[in-house]
Amino acid sequence: MEILSHLALGFSVALSFENLLYCMFGVIVGTAIGVLPGLGPLATIAMLLPLTYTLEPTSALIMLSGIYYGAQYGGSTTAILVNLPGESASVVTCLDGHKMALNGRAGSALAIAALGSFFAGTVGTALIAGFAPVLATFAFNFGPAEYFALMVLGLVAAVTLAHGSLLKALAMVVFGLVLGCIGIDVNSGVARLDFGFLELADGIEFVAIAMGVFAFTDIIVNWRKKQQEPVLAAKVTSLMPSREEFKESWPAAIRGTALGCVLGLLPGGGATLSSFASYTIEKRVSRHPERFGHGAPAGVAGPESANNAGSQSSFIPMLTLGIPSNGVMALMIGAMMIHDIVPGPQIMTENAPMFWGLVVSMWIGNLMLLVLNLPMVGIWVKLLRVKYDVLAPLILIFCLIGLYSIHNQSFEIYLAAIFAVVGYLFKRMNCEPAPLLLGFILGPMMEENLRRALLLSRGSAMTFIERPISAGLLVVSALILAVVLSPALRRKREEVFAEEEA
């Protein structure tokens, strides 16, 4: 009964005209950036983050959340129609979705993707509503030592699940931790790493680093690739899958949803990892694995369900523990901090209307996407006709306005420009910037909880081992590192990411 009362509160908040409007705006923008190649949800949310200063906290989170899971829908559209994934989680959809389009079944593939995503989104929302309170109750047992150990586990997982070299991923995390230390130390009052700039006394602005490393870098990379030619779409016929296609798709959608819900909880997991893992499983369990890569409906249903479920369930550790499982969730924490909202177990009691309003809005947003996505396929395809040399300046102008509006000064613009160059160098060196963002977000919180734990234990580091939860989390972190550093698994990991990039 308590869950029902909470859901009733959530519906009363989510169904307000203002929140419905922002939810629709978020899912439409998310679908659009999922369709457009080279502009993912991370860069888009970073660009729109300054707008949340003027919004109510609940409306801001509803809009940003809609962009995130809306991008999972939109990315499948171009992957199926033109073999061009608009979003990284839709890369694997190209393998069978585009083959179905070439075989005259583009409509069926789009319908399978949309229905699978809606099912996964509904299950993911139910998981948040049912599982988050339990996890929040358990989180009340966490003290500073447990939070420090949990953040160590998050950073270790981010390193091991990042693309490419483990050493590069570790370097990115360390770089993020160093950036998080810039500014005046709250305990001693000593300025750290500010190089004499008074503007850095409060640290680097989160929006500046996010826009620079992601949004500006994406513009530089895509402009360098000269993506200026319009892309023509395949002809869309029937939108209804056949009975055989539906029969093959629904078990894959269930398996993909279950897998995405689990992997979305892991730090460093989420939509992309879930989609690739689902495709691998579907190919293994299929009675006709030879059909994969040649238009198998399960090769569309499984990954599309997995990536949407992964994007939904990644909200659970972010909301209840304050731990971002990926870069987008780190941006969501940044948006909450803008409004002085601290994510964690207390959020369900101190900000109950916001929490349950956000949960219910996710299901409403998925319903909107199902209604909008199929009829608007033609409109999204037309966006692909916009040349990038027209689109990029508009994105750049929007970013500059947002950066200047933070403190009405140009310092943040200069910072973003510096991080744009840094982000471009990371791209050239095949360094994934997401671990940097996680390190930047978690670094100050790790330092604060480390100091609190040592103060409470009178300087004894044994407190991290003596407390069972903290010791368990540190052991798990050590085991993950040991397993991943083993030669056999390291080679297998490199093969997986090499296949993903191919």
Image (spheres, rainbow, N blue to C red):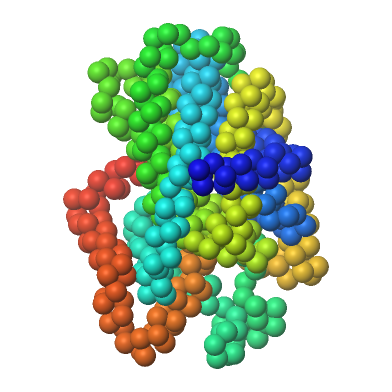
Q: How many marks?
A: 0
In this rendering, position of residue 387 left or right of residue 358: right
**Which is more toward the observer, 68 or 43?**
68
Q: Position of residue 73 (x, y in %)?
A: 56, 32
Placement of 53 over or under 260, stated as above or below: below
**Which is more toward the observer, 389 or 217?**
217
For residue 366, which quarter of the picture?
Answer: top right
Residue drawn at point x = 51 percent, y = 24 percent: 115
Placement of 177 over or under 332, stated as above or below: below
For residue 388, which quarter of the picture?
Answer: top right
Q: Position of residue 450 (x, y in %)?
A: 42, 79
Residue drawn at point x = 45 percent, y = 8 percent: 242
Q: Position of residue 48 (x, y in %)?
A: 69, 51
Is residue 214 among what the camera can see?
no
Q: Could you tell me which quadrant the C terminus lies in?
A: top left
Residue drawn at point x = 66 percent, y = 20 percent: 375
Residue lying furthest right = 408
Q: Position of residue 45 (x, y in %)?
A: 63, 50
For residue 11, which quarter of the picture?
Answer: top right
Placement of 47 over or under 143, stated as above or below: above
**Which is more toward the observer, 331 or 223?**
331
In this rendering, position of residue 435 left or right of residue 45: left
In this rendering, position of residue 152 left or right of residue 404: left
Placement of 184 over or under 302, stated as above or below: below
